[in-house]
Each structure stands twice: as C-alpha cells, then as structure tokens.
Image (tube, grey):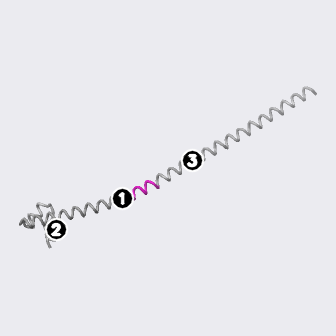
C-alpha cells in the first residue's frame, strides 16, 4: 500500500503540474492572440488614417493649385492686355502685335475692341 500511495501521489502531482502547464499555455496563447489582434487593428487603423490623410492632402493641394493657376492666369492675362495696348500705342499693327506677343490676330483685335 505504501508504494501504491506514493505512486498515486506522484500521479496527482504530475497531473496537477500538467494541468498547470496547460492552463499556462492557454493563458500564453490567449495573450499572444490578443496582442496579435491589437497589432493588426493598429496596422489597419494606420493604413486607414494614411489613406484619409492622403485624400485630404490631395484635395487641399488640388484646390490650392487651382487658386494659384487662376491667379497666375489672371496676372498673365493682365500683362498680355497691357503689352497689346502698349504696342498699339506705339503704332504697331494688330498683325505685328500678334507676332510680338505670340498670340492670334483675333485675340489682339478682341483685346483692342
């Protein structure tokens, strides 16, 4: 009986240790799974945030570019009109003005009207 009791106690200890090991492994797996899910969620969030930021930046850049383009176009238009009138006041013909300003004769005539 003494040997039987000792063997039984050893079996209980091993079983308890096995149970503890399985519980530990289950906790470790759950922790790793949780950390993986958090990491994956962070990556998805960063990707979504970058996409939103890129689209917003493109929109802001497009609007700024349009505003600059319109302003530059107006400035060039004003300069062109001034140049046409300056050459006209100097006695240049519409044909000469068109060549000097690198614009069509029709545009010169439209400006002078």
Task: Say which of 20 and 81 sits in front.
Answer: 81
Residue 60 image point, x, y percent: 39, 58
What residue would you read off at disc 2?
107
Is disc 1 placed on a helix, strand or loop?
helix
Q: Does the magenta stretch include residue 50?
A: no
Residue 80 image point, x, y percent: 17, 63
Task: Say which of 50 and 72 sits in front.
Answer: 72
**Sequence-first disc among 1 and 3:** 3
Task: Say which of 73 and 1 sits in front.
Answer: 73
Mark 2 → mark 1, Cα distance in angstroms: 30 Å
Looking at the image, which residue is at 43% across and 54% down?
Answer: 54
Looking at the image, which residue is at 72% across and 38% down?
Answer: 24
Q: In this view, does 56 lie above or below 15?
A: below
Residue 56 image point, x, y percent: 43, 57
First to last magenta residue range: 52-59
- Per the picture, the main secondary structure of the magenta-coloured stretch is helix
What residue would you read off at disc 1?
62
Is disc 3 placed on a helix, strand or loop?
helix
Picture quarter with the N terminus: top right
Q: Is residue 94 above or below residue 5?
A: below
Looking at the image, which residue is at 13% across and 65% down?
Answer: 84
**Sequence-first disc among 2 and 1:** 1
Left or right: 75 as drawn, with respect to 99: right
Mark 2 → mark 3, Cα distance in angstroms: 62 Å
The quadrant in which residue 68 appears is bottom left
Residue 40, disc: 3
Left or right: 32 as drawn, with respect to 73: right
């Amino acid at each position: 009986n003494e040997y039987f009791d000792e063997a039984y106690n050893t079996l209980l200890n091993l079983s308890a240790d096995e149970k503890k090991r399985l519980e530990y492994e289950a906790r470790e797996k759950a922790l790793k799974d949780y950390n993986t899910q958090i990491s994956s969620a962070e990556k998805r969030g960063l990707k979504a945030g970058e996409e939103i930021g890129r689209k917003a930046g493109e929109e802001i850049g497009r609007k700024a570019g349009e505003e600059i383009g319109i302003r530059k176009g107006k400035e060039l238009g004003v300069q062109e009109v001034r140049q046409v009138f300056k050459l006209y006041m100097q006695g240049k013909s519409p044909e000469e003005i068109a060549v000097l300003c690198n614009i069509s004769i029709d545009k010169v005539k439209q400006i002078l009207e």
